[in-house]
Amino acid sequence: MTPETSRYADFDGLRTQAVALRRQGLSLRQIRDRLQVYNHDLLHRLVNGEQPPEWTKRPRAKDDLRARARELRMEGKTYDQIQLELGCSKSSISLWVRDLPKPERRDPAGQAKIAARKRWEHELAVRDVERRKTKQAASAEIGALSERELLLAGAALYWAEGAKDKPYARRENVQFVNSDPGVIQVYLAWLRLLEVEPERLAFRVMIHATADAEDAQRYWAELVGIEPSAFQKTTIKTHNPKTIRKNVGPDYRGCLVIRVSQGAELYRRIEGWWCGIVGAVDSINRA
């Protein structure tokens, strides 16, 4: 008997060592090297009945597919829908999900409505992309504004949104009211062009009673660059309960009222600019 054969003859002793090493988490190769047992069959006999450590187990290629198939089935997907997404056979899908409840059959009319809604959502998404492209292209066409262009734009803007003098009520006041932050920024830039001193400006929020007036005042104060405490008393508008308001939600901040003190002379100039614009257009029409 060779020394190697005699060493293997102590099977029970080797098995005791092999089992202990296996339970410590060693792989077969590590046990082989540690005990110097290079006989493949004997090595397997020594650890027979002992589970291999988790780290030595190779994940099966289809484990992820199986898990995903079960997720889809629990979401109510059919075999055809699962096969379309995962690309595996129906027979495999059946084995993986057969213990799960079958999805409820949908009413054909309901399915048609769902399909129509998805098509419409896709159409809206396409339209939204086109809408943004058009706006971006149009914005790029403007470029930089000259002082004359800003003068004309501001005069037209004021005549559309500002307070105006009437024959039956002489009020040559410069007062502007709007809820659009962009419009407010253009209007203030126009006043700066006209060299209206900041101390001549008075600000006030006008907002519905159901809205957050303090939050609105903070928002407008940050936009125009002054402290909320510099604002005049907020004007609260009462709401008629019989009408449905659409200007609601967190983005509703009422209107900002901007008044220029001692503005009679400025008002007359604004009216004159507007008459000049109308006269110029009239000349083009007659040409």
Image (cartoon, rainbow, N blue to C red):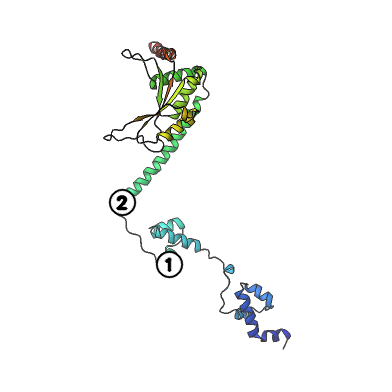
Asked whether residue 114 appears in the rendered view, the answer is: yes
Q: Is residue 46 shown left or right of residue 111?
A: right
Question: x, y (%) of residue 104?
Answer: 33, 59
**What label sits on residue 95 in the rendered view?**
1
Label 1 sits on a secondary structure element that is: helix
Q: Quadrant of residue 100?
A: bottom left
Q: Estimate how packed mark 1 is, as few (under 14), some (14 to 19) or many (20 or more) residues with alpha carbons within 10 Å.
A: few
Residue at the left extreme? 242
Residue at the right extreme? 3
Circle 2 residue: 110
Q: Eyeballing the image, is 64 above or below 18? A: above
Label 2 sits on a secondary structure element that is: helix
Q: Nearer the viewer, residue 36 or 13?
A: 13
CA separation in Å, label 2 and label 1: 30 Å
Q: Which quarter of the rendered picture does the C terminus lie within?
A: top left
Q: Quadrant of residue 258?
A: top left
Dot 1 amino acid type: Leu
Q: Is residue 25 shown left or right of residue 202?
A: right
Dot 2 amino acid type: Gly
Q: Nearer the viewer, residue 143 or 148?
A: 148
Asked whether residue 134 appears in the rendered view, the answer is: no
Q: Earlier in the sequence, mark 2 or mark 1?
A: 1
Question: x, y (%) of residue 231?
Answer: 44, 27
Q: Give me the residue at 38% from left, 21% from top.
A: 160
Q: Nearer the viewer, residue 40 or 136?
A: 136
